[in-house]
Image (cartoon, grey):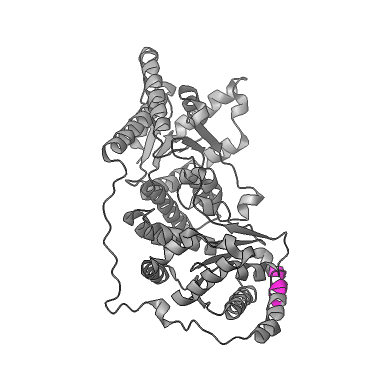
Amino acid sequence: MFESAEIEHRVDKETFREQVPLLRKALLDAQYDLKEKPDFPVVILIHGFDGAGRGDTMNLLNEWMDPRLIRTVAFDAPNDEARARPWMWRYWRELPGKGRIGIFFGSYYSDMLFGRVKGHSDWDAFDLQIQESRQFEHMLAQDGALVIKFWFHLSREKQKKRLKTLEKDPATRWRVTKTDWEHFEQYDLIRKYAEHMIRLTNTADAPWIIVDGEDANYRSLTVGNTVLNMLRARLAEQAEQGKTKPNAPPLMAPIDNKLILDALTLDQPTTRDDYRAQIDKLQGRLYHLTRHPRFAEHALMLAFEGNDAAGKGGAIRRITQALDARTYHVVPIAAPTEEERAQPWLWRFWRYVPAKGRITIFDRTWYGRVLVERVEGFASEPDWMRAYFEINDFEHQLSENGIIVIKFWLTISEEEQYARFKAREETGFKRFKITEEDWRNREKWEQYRLAVSDMVDRTSTTRIPWVLVEANNKYFARLKILETICETLEARLHTPS
């Protein structure tokens, strides 16, 4: 895999001086074209052997292009904040927006590679991380991102020579660290695992470019031209095709038109007295569970979806009444902002992933992609179709990190919704809850009914099932939600990990 990078590629000084001005101008032109028509972001990953020019290349790209439009992030070992969350969280946070370039010096590939080299992971865990990174890059590519991955290569002998040369010169001695020499001693192991990693992640979505790192002129021109050519090709593709995408196979409703929501008995017999008798006990139970010693090993994410006026806000208030205000965060999800539209669609949800010992409550969620965006046509069919897989993958990563995810769909009848809408219009302090949009959405009741059933069928998993809440009776719905949270926490906290 690395043979072509070990045949001593070189570019003489005169050729380098001739080509650099033209290359720099072309890179700037392409960068400004990207800025003027921000249809996609560019993510550049820089990896390779110590001494192969990774840092020089990162600095060079910032010098040759407009650094104001580049976000450069050097990733080191994760800090406490990152360790308290899923391992991909810190990479999601740093993604560039559309029209911008992000340079990652080190990335998730460093985590998986050196985790394997140091023996922190076995082959199975290593391959699982490789699969997760491949899925992450596929999501980025499907969302339009251009992902460019460089591996800067040196043979063992050339690496030793490079490190000694840097160490000998007082001006560059500081660049060689104890860790560099430790990695040199592990060269064969790093090469072995890097080859395995590169082979399995060298995809059409995000291919690896292996660069001979010995000669600075060759390395610099190779990287500059690669970025230029890939950026130009993507800009031309966007100009020619725009945002058109192939249609996905259509989803069919059941032939008998019977959906999962039809199996629910929406009117449940819970009286106000029953509610009062149970609510305090359930809230007390929840209070103690979130202070259980083992809760610090987990985090809790509650996801609320449902029909308009189904009682999500009221249910959330009954939950937060039982929680310490310092430990939870309620996130209301509305239409995405300009900043959020410039990022991959899951980015705004990754931002709010709670640390261990914390709670995040989502009022509306990532399921908007397969509900309102599907029904209202805000997302194309291929985009919301692929979202089912991306959602399941997202939730799997949360669960693997010890986050307890509970998702509720609150459902009411069409008649009950109408009654609640009218009551809101006639009650002064509730009028803000009803809008023309709410009335308009009722006209698409059947489309939402089908979308919800597809959502449940495709994203209700053994580990994170949908909890369907019969919500015509608000008292019953609130008690069921609290009971579900308590039972789920008890099962997780009282069962050895």
Q: Nearer the viewer, residue 482 or 91?
A: 482
Q: Nearer the viewer, residue 242 or 334?
A: 334
The majority secondary structure of the magenta stretch comes to helix
Which quarter of the image is occupied by the C terminus? bottom right
Which quarter of the image is occupied by the N terminus? top left
The answer to whether residue 453 is above or below residue 372 is below
Residue 109 falls inside the magenta stretch: no
Q: Nearer the viewer, residue 103 or 480?
A: 480
Q: Position of residue 65 (x, y in %)?
A: 46, 25
In the shown orientation, is residue 389 left or right of residue 321? left
Residue in view at x 26 percent, y 77 percent: 255
The answer to whether residue 469 is above or below residue 333 is below
Q: Quadrant of residue 300?
A: bottom right
Residue in view at x 61 percent, y 47 percent: 78
Residue in view at x 59 percent, y 42 percent: 76
Q: Position of residue 441 (x, y in %)?
A: 43, 63
Q: Position of residue 62 (x, y in %)?
A: 50, 26
In the shown orientation, is residue 274 left or right of residue 254? right
Q: Is residue 441 visible?
A: yes
The magenta-colored residue range is 285-294
The answer to whether residue 349 is above or below residue 298 is above
